[in-house]
Image: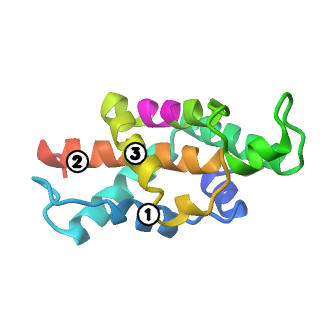
Amino acid sequence: MAKRDVRDVLVGMGITIDEIVSAALELYFPHPGVETREKAEAIFRRELGLALSDPNLALLIYAGVLLENEGRKQNLPNINQSDYDNDLTCLIADEVLGMSVAKYIGGYKGIFDYVRYDKAKPGILGRLGPFMDDVIGGLIGGVSANMYTRAGAGFD
């Protein structure tokens, strides 16, 4: 039996790798080792592929998928549907999951970049539900932090 890939799970949620890359590049800024948008895209895609091959990260992402699906079905315990639908500030489990993804991938730099993406909500992040926008924001933040750190250190 073939193992299930988290990329396929994301596509099932309507989230493509190209959309993740596009959202990441909306906040791109030139940096040593990542001087052009084209170079940034190539390095980001490589780092994203490495990250998505990690089974622990795949499970964190999958936790977000499950929570999002249960929220849509109104099955989340102790959460009013309106709180879920409006992503109220009292709902912080989504932020914790996003920060966990970002920190797992990129350490504290990943969390810093996650916050940038969470505030700006570029591209696909603006249309995702309350859990997946933070999970994908954390994924982008962590991968972005690694991209800038490794490229700046000459590991491109």
Q: Could you say whether the residue bearing mark 3 is in a helix, strand or loop?
A: helix
Residue at (16, 60) in percent of width and height: 30
As drawn, the label of residue 148 is 2
- Residue type, label 1: Ala
- Residue type, label 3: Gly
Between the residue at mark 2 and the residue at mark 3, the CA separation in whole angstroms equals: 11 Å
According to the picture, the residue beneath numbered tag 3 turns out to be: 141
Residue at (42, 30) in percent of width and height: 103
Would residue 3 be seen by someone viewing this image from the given angle? no
The span shown in magenta is 99-104
Q: Find out whether residue 100 is within the magenta segment.
A: yes
According to the picture, the residue beneath numbered tag 1 turns out to be: 23
Between the residue at mark 3 and the residue at mark 1, the CA separation in whole angstroms equals: 11 Å
Query: In this figure, which colouring scheme has been used for the structure?
Result: rainbow
Q: Position of residue 1 (x, y in %)?
A: 78, 49
Residue at (21, 43) in percent of width and height: 150
